[in-house]
Amino acid sequence: MLPYSLSPLNVKDLRNFFNQFDFFDETNHTLKYIQIVQELAFCQQVIIHEAFSLIDDEPLGFVALCVTHDEIDNIAGMLVEFVYVKPKYRSVISEFLDTKFSYMILDYTIEIALKLQKNVAINHVYLVPVNEKVRKVYLDYGFENIPGSGKNEYEDFMVFNLLDEDPVLM
C-alpha cells in the first residue's frame, strides 16, 4: 500500500478540510483563487479531491474538478479548476512514487478522466495555470497550450488529450 491517498470529499467535510491548510505563504493572486475554489466547492460546482500523506498524517494538497462543455469551443472535457500542493511538498519527489507530488495529483486526475470517458463523452482535460512557473510544470507533464483561448496570454487554457489518436471524421 502506498503511503498516500487521493479521494473525493463530501461537501460536509470541506470546512474541516480547508481549516487544515495554512495559506499565509501564498501570493494574493493564489489566495483569491483559493477563495473562489472554496466557494465553488461549497456550492457543489467543483468536487475537491484530497491528496493525503499517511506518513505525515496530513493533507498534502488537493485538486478541484468538474466536467464542462462550454469552456473551450463547446468541447466537453474535465476541467481542473485548481491544483494545490502545500509548499513543503512542492518540487519534492516522493521516494515511494519516484515522481513529484503535483504529478501524483495529475496522474490521479487523468485516471478519473479516463474512467469517466468510458461513460461520458469527454476526450480532454483542461486547465488554466495560476502562473507561468506552473504552466511549465503542466507542459512537462504533457499538457499543451491553446493560444488565444483566454482573456490574455497568461490565462490561456492548456489541454491534455485523452484520445490515443485524433478521431477520423466521416
Image: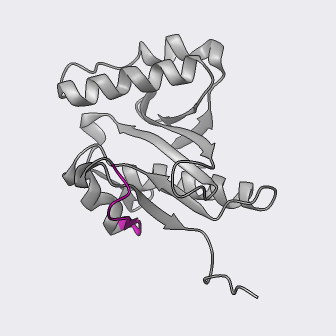
Locate residue 81, reporting x and y percent. Answer: 47, 40
Q: Quadrant of residue 139?
A: bottom left
Apparent side of residue 42 relative to residue 157 in the rendered image (left or right): right
Residue 148: within the magenta? yes
* Total residue callouts: 0
Locate residue 57, reporting x and y percent. Answer: 46, 27
Locate residue 142, reporting x and y percent. Answer: 41, 69
From this viewpoint, is residue 26 visible? no
- The quadrant of the image that shows the C terminus is bottom right
Between 169 and 132, which is closer to the camera in this rendering?
A: 169
Magenta segment's dominant SS is loop
Q: Residue at x 25, y 61 (%)?
A: 136
Residue 59: within the magenta? no
Apparent side of residue 85 relative to residue 132 in the rendered image (left or right): right
Please give the range of residues in magenta: 141-150
For the view shown, which residue lies furthest in the right direction?
119
Q: Quadrant of residue 34?
A: top left
Locate residue 25, reporting x and y percent. Answer: 18, 25
Q: Quadrant of residue 165?
A: bottom right
Q: Residue at x 57, y 62 (%)?
A: 124
Q: Is residue 79 above or below residue 117?
A: above
Between 97 and 159, which is closer to the camera in this rendering?
A: 159
Q: Is residue 144 above or below residue 44?
A: below
Q: Is residue 18 above or below residue 64?
A: above
Between 49 and 37, which is closer to the camera in this rendering?
A: 37
From this viewpoint, is residue 84 visible? yes
Q: Residue at x 45, y 27 (%)?
A: 37
Q: Residue at x 66, y 22 (%)?
A: 10
